[in-house]
Amino acid sequence: IEPSYLILTHSHWDHVFGPQHFPDVPVVAQADFSRWAAAPDARLLDKIARFEEEADIHRHAPFTIPTPFQTFDAEGELPLGDLRLRLTHAPGHAPDQLTVYDAASGTLWAADMLSDLEIPFVSDSLAAYERTLADLAARDIRALVPGHGAPTTDTTEIRARLADDRAYLAELRERVEGAVGAGKTLDETVAACADMRYRRPDDNAGPHRLNVESAYAELGGAADETAVGWAAAWD
């Protein structure tokens, strides 16, 4: 069956491979994807090349950034048979991240959010991530499909993931704002956040530290925002 559309949820390296396998299928993305695609980060292209080398993937032609056929800014609608899928800009993890929502069934395709395996990866903006989760918390979500981790139709589980992730971001903000207000250094702030509780700490300790570093720069700490946190590590 040939798909009708390919929706790219955001521009991180592990989410842009699909269109090359369906060259005649129109691609849909948030408008910032096109702005990013016009001047992609060389680190992303290098990451793709290294991934393919490690996976022993051989190409007949070089990888090219997908070109969206259709974009939207804040919200868009995508007709698909009897469905009217709602596309919503959902920054926080990535500037161009989007979610897909079917109101009739209460199904949310959440891109890289609301995972049972990962904490929020705040690789774009803490403030934007908080606003995005507040918007999602107001929706009727009866089926959740995250980009990483297990989907679920357990509404108690869905509410718990939302509540846990919002609580994590709120505590992250509170602790980092307190540290910045007290004039603490970046390392002191990381130490002040070391005992925060979050899911799967053995797997998520690294991303948590990057979240703290990025939040420190975003909230006015004495750090070069391009040289710490996700901005320095994300490739």
Image: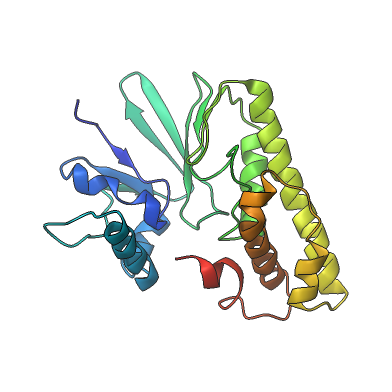
Up the image or down, 149 lies above or below 70; here it is above
Q: Would residue 11 be found to the left or right of residue 210 on screen? A: left
**Residue at left 28%, top 45%?**
18
Residue farthest toward the right in the current orientation of the protein: 182
Identity of the residue drawn at 39% across and 52% down: 14
Q: Is residue 111 left or right of residue 210?
A: left
At x 36%, y 64%, the residue is: 47
Instruction: Give the quarter of the image for residue 92.
Output: bottom right
218 to 72, vertically: above or below: below
Q: Is residue 16 above or below residue 217?
A: above
Image quarter of residue 231: bottom right
In percent of width and height, residue 20 lies at: 21, 49
- Which colouring convention does the figure follow? rainbow
Q: Residue 84: x and y, percent?
A: 40, 26
190 or 25: nearer the viewer: 190
Residue at 47 percent across and 50 percent down: it is 97
Q: Please identify the quadrant where the N terminus is shown.
A: top left
Of all residues, the one furthest to the left in this rendering is 60
Q: Quadrant of the C terminus?
A: bottom left
Residue 154 at x, y percent in the picture? 61, 20
As drawn, is 171 to the left or to the right of 213? right
Residue 190: x and y in percent read: 75, 68
Number of marks in picture: 0
Q: Is residue 154 above or below residue 133?
A: above
